[in-house]
Image (tube, rainbow, N blue to C red):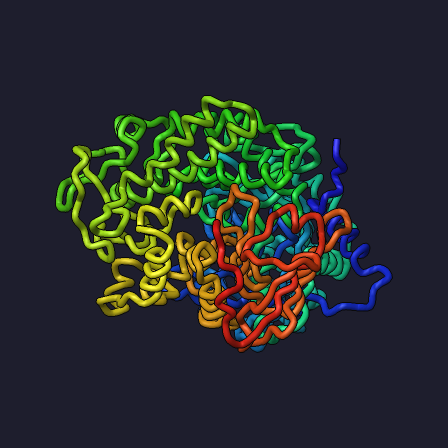
Amino acid sequence: MRSRLNMCGLSGIILLFAVMMSGCAVRPDGLSYVNPNIGGVGHTLKPTRPTVQLPNQMIRMYPDRKDCLDDQIRSFPLTLLSHRRGFLFGIMPYSGQAEENREPVSAWGWENEICTPYYYSVWLEDYDTTLEFTPGAKTGHFRITFPKDAAKNVRLRTVQSGEWNRVDDRTVAGVEQFNGMKAFVYGQFSQPFEFSAAAQRWDGNGGVVHWSENKPAVIEFKYAISFISDQQAKKNFASEIADRSFETTKENARLAWSGVLNQIEVKGGTAVQRRVFYTALYRCYERMVNITEDGRYYSNYDKQIHTDDRLFYVDDWIWDTYLAHHPLRVILNPAQEADMIQSYVRMYEQSCWLPTFPVLDGDMPCMNGFHSTIMILDAYRKGVRDFDAATAFAGMKKNAMEATMLPWRNGPGGSLERFYAQKGYYPAPAVGQANTASEADSFEKRQSVALTLGHSYDDWALGQFAGELGHADDAAYFAGRANNYKNLYWKEKGFLMPKDDQGRWIDIDPKFGGGQGGREYYCENNGWTYLWQVQHDVPGLMELMGGKKVFEQRLDQLFREDLECSKYDLWAQFPDSTGMVGQFSMGNEPSFHIPYLYDFTDAPWKTQKKIRMLLNAWFTDSILGIPGDEDGGGMSAVVVFSSMGFYPVTPGKPLYAIGSPVFEKVTIHLPGGKRFIVSAPGCSETNAYIQQAFLNGRPLASPWFSHADLVQGGELKLIMGQKPNRDWGVSEK
């Protein structure tokens, strides 16, 4: 049995940081570059949130406001229900007397807010009150400084269905019910609060606690959350925070963040690039979150409390995170990734389906595809083996053979899935034809092309995993289904296009066909984006297009093709298509790998050009510094990889495509004490092109290197210049 000290706990993170720093000159702390408000205003959809938490732990807090331009704060949640899905419990301090029947709300300003991953502070203008917060794993600590000689109040809220109760004159407890499960809170104030009829008000979803004018100005509130029971919440409180000061909790949290962020050390680049990089890395630790409490956890997948010697993680949107987020964790913390994969296995055992969006309260069947199959294969092939592979395979195969493929739906399949198994594509309704598949979501539709492409990749991964486990028949069967994408390539049109259930082409405009978000045929993006959704078989796609040169020309055209409409009209139909360059959308997941496809051609220098341009154009250190929905690490992991100079184009294949690093030197401190270094002499804002490359001192002629090269430690050296070396990296892959 491997050691449980695998950076999953706070002590492991602090120990790693201490080992890294011992005997070394003091390095710049990556934590100092993090700005959680980068991307705090969404281009069209959701902003990022300045989440304050420990890495991959369940207590996550940010102020309840619409975005960072909203000048009013409504409350301070005690934790999140799930990424971007609402809160559990909350407090709001205020001074003086509250208006009758009005929730306390206060204005705030950037000049009086401090926001870091481990500490938050804000001055509430309406109440002349300063609130501070620092997180534990299952606990949180607020410190509130009221004005002197003023009445002091804290509004206690529940957000879902629930209540708060008085335990004694310092202690409160509460419960919230949501989506078939419960959250429990136990908290203590540093000063006894009053209970006179005028001072104490309780209502259906919370209450107000009060201190008179002559009480101390500083009031602290410590609390613990449990998803098991009220007694477990009290136990979490006693074991983690009861005897800790605010400053001790804050320092522990700071050390935890320094430990994970300084696992990647950078030298060079601009201050903006360092802020963008380390903020992106910070966001990669928002999810998944560990909800194990003293060796037990409550799972809403079977509504049971389980005892397990493995940590149980929830909150993952695999359509977003399989691309780069999970592959990044495989490098930085493979032991933690194994626990996360085993959590997926546990969810399959408990619910009979391998989840797609495993959030706190169950599987949220968003998007299309079963991309956990790809995530698991990728980790397995990169040496992550500490999970139940046989049960994982059973879950993958059951999803592929028995589950509905319809987006935003869970459960067994039906006639459309039988059609897919027989014909090798998902049928689409003709233009103007009513969607006769009543089981399809009325808004999300069938997404027939996107679904066929996604499942082709999933089936490729399933076949590959079957081969790894020695299931030859399954390997052959799913290898055949991996070619289903070819059934939708309309050669005369040059696009992957929909067919009806009679096998007839549906002639649509690939730019605008499919209605809102293209959902009748694609998903959130148009046919130009989905032309490239064949990561598992790029040579096969290249052959369909007519060869390597045509493939390169189509890539060029993707970035040049006119919108043929105003941005207003574009976003009315495709609000997810942000960060546009021609028909390329930097702001949405299906595009992330596309700039790296030039590495398959005779022009890998174009990957270098595009990556630098895209990073500089769309990822800045401002409130508009993220071009689309960041999705809690999904997009940020792309920034981390691309800034370092490489990217996992095809999760499931242990290879990395080389791009253009933005730093002169990147050092990845690997588990076990090894280091992998990407050095880029001459790298600058203008010197974006690779002139020569060396791997561990040997010339590297290809724009690829393996995961084995990385985890064995060593150096990738890239000599950079201002103009491309068109001869370097011409690939036969």
Q: Residue 591 appears at what percent x and percent y? A: 40, 56
**248 to the left or right of 347:** right
- Left or right of residue 381: residue 86: left
Q: Quadrant of the N terminus?
A: top right
User: From the viewer's perspective, is residue 106 above or below residue 574?
Assistant: below
- Can residue 107 be seen by looking at this rendering? no
Asked whether residue 715 appears in the rendered view, the answer is yes
In the image as oriented, which residue stretches furthest toward the front? 727
Instruction: Say if 249 sits above or below 627 in the image.
Output: above
Residue 195 location (% of width, % of height): 62, 53
Q: Is residue 174 above or below residue 199?
A: above
Residue at the image position 22 percent from the left and 34 percent from the top = 437
Residue at (39, 26) in percent of width and height: 401
Residue 631 in the image: above or below residue 359 = below
Tell which of 696 and 455 is nearer to you.
696
In the displayed orientation, state which residue is furthest to the right.
23
Total marks placed: 0
In front of the other: 404 or 610? 610
Could you say which quadrant of the image residue 504 lies in?
A: top left
Residue 430: percent from the left, percent from the top?
A: 15, 42
In the rendered image, residue 257, in percent from the top left (x then y), is placed at 68, 58
